[in-house]
Image: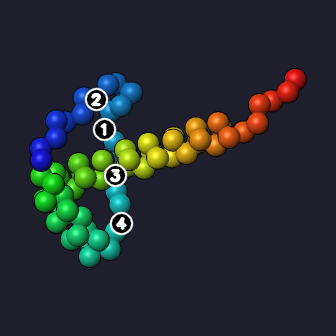
């Protein structure tokens, strides 16, 4: 399952990030990425995007649950 690379804009320039992960986690990530036809970087990019989407959704749900402010 090949993915189209995301286009970057000047404010969305790729940034290098160093992670320290257990060797077994890296081995397993490589296997999952290979199964999905992705690089480990692509897999982690997808996982980070999903985590951010979930976070933003939960923030919006919390905002919607707040009672309206009375002036």
Observer-nearest of 24 and 34: 34
Indicate which disc, 1 or 2, sits on the residue closer to the N terminus: 2
Sooner in the amino-acid sequence: mark 3 or mark 1: 1
Q: Residues within 10 Å of mark 2 (few under 14, many from 20)?
A: few
Q: Are marks 1 and 2 in contact (CB under 8 Å)?
A: yes
Q: Which residue is mark 4?
A: 20
Query: Residue 52 falls in which quadrant of the image?
Result: top left
Upstream in sequence: badge 4 or badge 2: 2
Numbered label attached to residue 8: 2
Q: In the displayed structure, does residue 44 sit left or right of residue 62? A: left
Q: Residue 61, located in which quarter of the rendered image?
A: top right
Question: Disc 3 or disc 1, which is closer to the eye?
Answer: 3
**In the depicted structure, whether residue 47 falls above or below residue 24:** above
Residue 62, horizontal then vertical, whole percent: 64, 43
Q: Residue at x 16, y 66 (%)?
A: 31
Question: Does 69 appear above or below 19?
Answer: above
Mark 3 to mark 1 CA distance (whole Å): 16 Å
Res. 14 mark = 1
SS at circle 3: helix
Where is residue 38 shown, x and y percent of the image? 16, 51
Q: How is the image coloured?
A: rainbow
Mark carried by residue 47: 3
At horizontal 24% and vertical 64% (from top left) the residue drawn is: 29
- In this orientation, which residue lies closer to the viewer: 43 or 58? 58
Q: Are there few (<14), some (14-19), or many (20+) residues within 10 Å of tag 1?
A: few
Label located before the other in sequence (3 or 4):
4
Find out whether the residues at labels 4 and 2 contact each other: C-beta distance under 8 Å.
no
């Amino acid at each position: 399952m090949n993915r189209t690379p995301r286009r970057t804009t000047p404010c969305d320039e790729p940034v290098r990030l160093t992670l320290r992960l257990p060797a077994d986690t890296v081995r397993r990530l490589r296997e999952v990425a290979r199964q999905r036809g992705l690089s480990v970087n692509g897999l982690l990019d997808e996982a980070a995007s999903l985590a951010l989407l979930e976070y933003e959704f939960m923030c919006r749900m919390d905002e919607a649950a707040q009672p309206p402010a009375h002036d």
